[in-house]
Image (cartoon, helix red, strand yellow):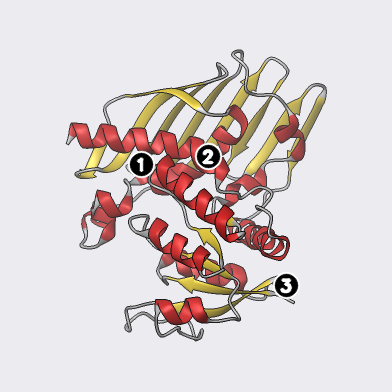
Amino acid sequence: MSVGVGLVGFGAAGRQHAAALDGHPAARTVAVLELDPAVDVAGLPRAGSWRELLADPRIGLVSLCLPPGHRAELAVQALEAGKAVLLEKPPARSVTEIDLLSAASRRAGRPVGVMLQHRMRLPAAALAANWAVPAVTAVLEVSRFRPPAHYRRAGWRSDPAEAFGGIAAHLGVHYLDLACQLLGHPEKVRLAPSRELAPGIDSRVTGHIEFRAGATLAFTVTAESAVRSERLQILGPDGGLCIADGMVTTQIGDTEQTLPTVTTPELRRMVYQEMAEAVTTGRPPLRCHLDGARPVTEILTFVARELAVAS
């Protein structure tokens, strides 16, 4: 039997979640909670209220496709109502929020996952290798053009308290999270001067990260170039890994491997497969678990704090 999902919010993220659930063998959309009556929910059933959605016995998983601002509070309420939770990215605005959600998850006995779907690209051999050593160095670049109006228009995108930042938090987060899955927790973050389209809403972030185990990462995330690029390269004494626009190439020991590219919509479907299994077993999802988002949340919190100081 498939897991029933309640989607909360039907903006760009909510539509992506609905597409991932369409025809999914393990999970299905039961209801959509979208408070704006003018928003078309693509023919899906609408929940009348947050309370109604939480009371629906058909729903085992609540997917919060909302801005980060008040998401943690809603996630705790969903857990207390006996629902598992899937958080859109960025999953939290602080490690304190992650601790809050982890504690609520343990009390409720229900799992919490994150829609950081690019984790599904990492091959098992790369996850098993030891990249968290001083001899490892990495380079990351994410470029996705966004016009100034995208962030300056009215609404949550121009509000740093709701959005938790701009291009770094909403697009750079994916590949920064991938780096953290392999390199571990950040020890020091240093930033070059950033650029903003609105106070606290970055359009370019460049910096250098030292990880606790000694590995380093140089990174830049920009919304100001017409060139679209997502690339993470990790170089170590025993091999390397490169993820470039979704294509994964590894050289671990004497073995070189290039994996077939998986589309982003298919990665989202894989996250829902994991979440369906987590709901059934009550255990945290294997890859899209909340605890793994601590390192990237530390990085984004530092970026947000530096933007606030600069503003």
The location of residue 251, given as percent across then percent down, is: 74, 27
| CA neighbours of label 2 inside 10 A, class few (<14), some (14 to 19), many (20+) | many
Q: CA distance from mark 2 to mark 1?
A: 22 Å
Counting residues from the N terminus, which is met first, the one under dot 1 or under dot 3?
3
**Residue located farthest toward the left when viewing the structure as drawn:** 311
Residue 91 image position (x, y, % from top left): 46, 51
Q: Which residue is mark 1?
A: 225
Which residue shows up at 61% across the image and 81% down it?
Answer: 58
Q: Is residue 226 visible?
A: no
Instruction: Give the distance between the C-alpha atoms of the residues marked 1 and 3, in whole angstroms.
Output: 39 Å
What is the x, y in percent for residue 249?
Answer: 69, 35
Q: Circle 1 sits in a helix, a strand or a loop, which is it?
A: loop
- Which mark lies nearer to you, 2 or 1? 2
The reply, left or right, for residue 112 in relation to residue 9 is right
Q: Which residue is depicted at the point 65% across and 24% down? A: 131
Whether 285 is drawn above or below 245: the answer is: below
Q: Nearer the viewer, mark 1 or mark 3?
A: 3
Dot 3, crowdedness within 10 Å: few (<14), some or many (≥20)? some
Q: Which residue is mark 2?
A: 177
Is residue 45 visible from the viewing direction of this image? yes
Residue 116, compared with residue 203, is above or below; it is: below
Q: Secondary structure at mark 3?
A: loop
Q: Are marks 2 and 3 in contact (CB under 8 Å)?
A: no
Q: Amino acid at mark 1?
A: Ser
Of the 4 image quadrants, the one containing the N terminus is: bottom right
Q: Earlier in the sequence, mark 2 or mark 3?
A: 3
**Closer to us: 253 or 227:** 253
Element assignment for label 2 = helix
Residue 4: percent from left, percent from top: 62, 76
Amino acid found under the numbered disc labelled 2: Asp
User: Furthest residue to the right?
Assistant: 254
Task: Say if 37 sits above or below 247 in the image.
Answer: below
